[in-house]
Image: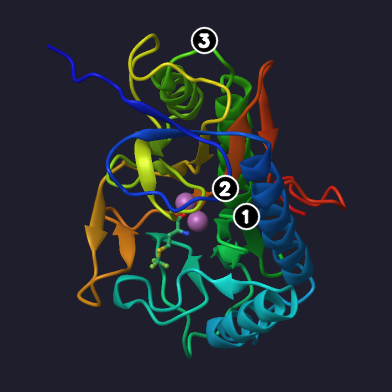
């Protein structure tokens, strides 16, 4: 028998447990997520001018930390399960969770920057792709299609739909372009908790999984590989790379299900959250 999905109504900003239930939030939650999501988007907006050849990923991490603090938040990744940086920066064949450091960005690189400011107890989790100078056309196409995958997934996020509808739509689009959809990492519920139920897989079957209900908050964050979907973990315990060394791209938004569809909490106020800013 399929596992029963349990939902839990959250009325305000009360403490919640990571107990496997899917939280259904009210207006206070939407307000909290708007503020956190707005700061995430503002930080990602500011990074376009800073990503260029010669800059290190550690320097970008410093900017993310300072902007998060200046915006009244704290980077949720700082001290999270032993992680000690303010964002993740994943270059070229790195799928996700790249650790900022001395690595110098070079002409032709593509990179994902993933930020999660924690503001007044709410998590705004979002990532976008950045490019350094001129990049090959195949990298450009991968980034465009990955962005389309995110937005197609969001199109399916509405009450009455099933979680599996989102993954199925993303998988169909990516595989239609002969790209690989990463299975080892997925989107997640969030709110007062950084990584909560449900798991939002980016592949699967339509009509399966929990029903989407107003007040559900979760991320959609497809990782799409130019080659095969397989990933490999590096010995640092965080960095995931493509097994076949192909390029990988990712975009992430945090959303909330409304009565009619969904609200994107991490939208850019400047309209910069498209594939290339
Ligand atoms: N922001 C990532 C996500 O989208 C999680 C990063 S956790 C870290 O879920 F510890 F690796 F930073
Ligand atoms: Co996330
Ligand atoms: Co993220």
Residue placed at 30% from the left, 22% from the top?
A: 5
The type of colouring in the image is rainbow
Along the viewing direction, whichever of 204 and 6 lies nearer the viewer = 6
Disc 1/disc 2 C-alpha distance (Å): 5 Å
Residue placed at 41% from the left, 59% from the top?
A: 96
Q: Is disc 1 placed on a helix, strand or loop?
A: strand
Q: Any atom of ligand 3 within 8 Å of the CB at mark 1?
A: no
Choose the circle earlier in sequence order: 1 or 2.
1
Choose the circle earlier in sequence order: 3 or 1.
1
- Lateral position of residue 56 relative to residue 268, left or right: left
Q: Is residue 141 visible?
A: no
The quarter of the rendered structure image containing the C terminus is bottom right
Residue placed at 57% from the left, 86% from the top?
A: 56
Q: Are marks 1 and 2 in contact (CB under 8 Å)?
A: yes
Query: Which label belongs to residue 251?
Result: 2
Q: How many marks?
A: 3
Q: Is disc 2 placed on a helix, strand or loop?
A: loop
Q: Is disc 3 placed on a helix, strand or loop?
A: loop
Give the percent coordinates (x, y) of residue 16.
Answer: 40, 49
Q: Which residue is mark 1?
A: 128
């Amino acid at each position: 028998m399929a596992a029963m999905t349990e939902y839990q109504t959250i009325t305000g900003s009360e403490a919640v447990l990571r107990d496997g239930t899917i939280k259904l939030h009210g207006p206070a939650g939407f307000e909290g997520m708007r503020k956190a999501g707005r700061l995430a988007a503002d930080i990602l907006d500011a990074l376009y001018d800073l990503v260029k050849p010669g800059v290190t990923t550690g320097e970008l991490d410093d900017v993310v930390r300072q902007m998060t603090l200046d915006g009244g938040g704290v980077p949720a990744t700082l001290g999270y399960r032993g992680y000690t940086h303010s964002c993740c920066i994943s270059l070229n064949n790195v799928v996700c969770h790249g650790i900022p450091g001395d690595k110098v960005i070079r002409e032709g690189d593509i990179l994902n920057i993933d930020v999660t400011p924690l503001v007044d107890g709410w998590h705004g989790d979002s990532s976008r792709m950045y490019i350094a100078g001129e990049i090959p056309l195949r990298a450009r196409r991968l980034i465009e299609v990955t962005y389309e995958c995110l937005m197609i997934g969001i199109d399916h996020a509405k009450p009455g739909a099933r979680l599996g509808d989102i993954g199925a739509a993303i998988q169909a689009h990516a595989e239609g372009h002969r790209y690989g959809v990463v299975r080892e990492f997925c989107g997640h519920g969030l709110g007062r908790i950084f990584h909560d139920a449900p798991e939002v897989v980016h592949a699967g079957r339509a009509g399966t999984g929990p029903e989407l209900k107003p007040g559900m908050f979760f991320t959609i964050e497809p990782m799409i590989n130019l080659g095969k979907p397989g990933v490999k973990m590096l010995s640092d315990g965080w960095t995931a790379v493509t097994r076949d060394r192909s390029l990988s791209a990712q975009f992430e938004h945090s959303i909330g299900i409304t009565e009619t569809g969904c609200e994107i909490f991490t939208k850019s106020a400047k309209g910069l959250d498209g594939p290339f800013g």
